[in-house]
Image (spheres, grey):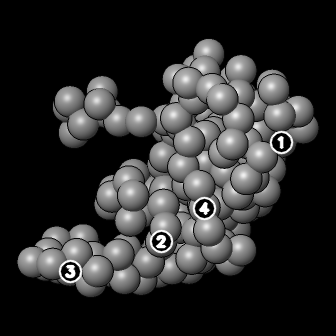
Amino acid sequence: MDGFESNEKSFLADRMVGRLGRWLRMMGVDCASAEGLLAPEVLDKALAERRVLVTRDTGLMKRRTRVERFFIRSNFVQEQVLEFLGAYPIDPLERAFTRCVECNEPLERVEKESLSDEVPVYVRRTQDVFSRCPACKRVYWAATHRRRMETRLRSLGQKTLEKREGTNADDLV
Ligand SMILES: [Zn+2]
């Protein structure tokens, strides 16, 4: 993993691709949200934080700016994820669920014993691995929801790999 992080790009998803942004954060991609920002502010943020702007906004694509932009064609979030992975190939499962889906903050591992009533009793009884977002304090755990998302991510990852020649899909899982 060392060195992998350093040359990795970070992204800014505009509000037209807000759901894609959530998917990217779920895959552990550093992707901030531009929700609530006006167009000039979106570009300023991308420039200041050196993020690639992921957008479906043709107006933003046409603007004269030094901001690196990636245009998403599809209206459908699953296709958008595939478009993204086609341009920025990453293993969608390797760092899945390491960032807060809401805030984009890297999650911190939290000891089960330190959790109180923020997690339902049955979850504490059945789960062992918990992490917390340092910003919004939301607690994450490996629940059914997470497994379902992993299955979807895995199938997306395999579709991406099938498109690339000479890649063994087994490498992913
Ligand atoms: Zn959060």
Note whether residue 31 is visible.
no
Query: At x 48% / y 61%, what residue is drawn?
Result: 84
Alpha-carbon span between mark 4 and mark 1: 17 Å
Residue at the image position 33 percent from the left and 56 percent from the top? 90
Above or below, 148 against 81 in this view is below
| Nearest to the observer: residue 69 or residue 29 | 69
Q: CA distance from mark 4 to mark 2?
A: 10 Å
Q: Is mark 3 within 8 Å of ligand 1?
A: no
The answer to which quarter of the image holds residue 126 is bottom right
Which marked residue is nearer to the observer: mark 4 or mark 1? 4
What kind of element bears circle 3?
A: helix
Looking at the rendered structure, the kind of residue marked 3 is Ala
From the viewer's side, name the closer residue of 88 and 93: 88
If the image is split into quadrants, where does the N terminus sit? top left
Residue found at x 30% / y 27%? 6
102, 70: nearer the viewer:
70
- Disc 3 versus disc 2: distance between alpha carbons? 15 Å
The CA distance from mark 2 to mark 1 is 22 Å
Mark 4 or 2 closer to N-term?
4
Q: Looking at the image, is 9 positioned above or below residue 153?
A: above
According to the picture, the residue beneath numbered tag 2 turns out to be 82
Q: Is residue 168 above or below residue 59?
A: below
- Name the spot of residue 43 as percent of width and height, x first: 71, 28
Outermost residue toward the top? 48
In the rendered image, which residue does mark 1 sit on? 35
> Three-letter amino acid code at disc 2?
Leu
Which of the two marks, 4 or 3, is nearer to us in this view?
Answer: 4
Question: Which label sits on residue 72?
Answer: 4
Of labels 3 and 2, the one closer to you:
2
Label 4 is placed on what type of residue? Answer: Ile
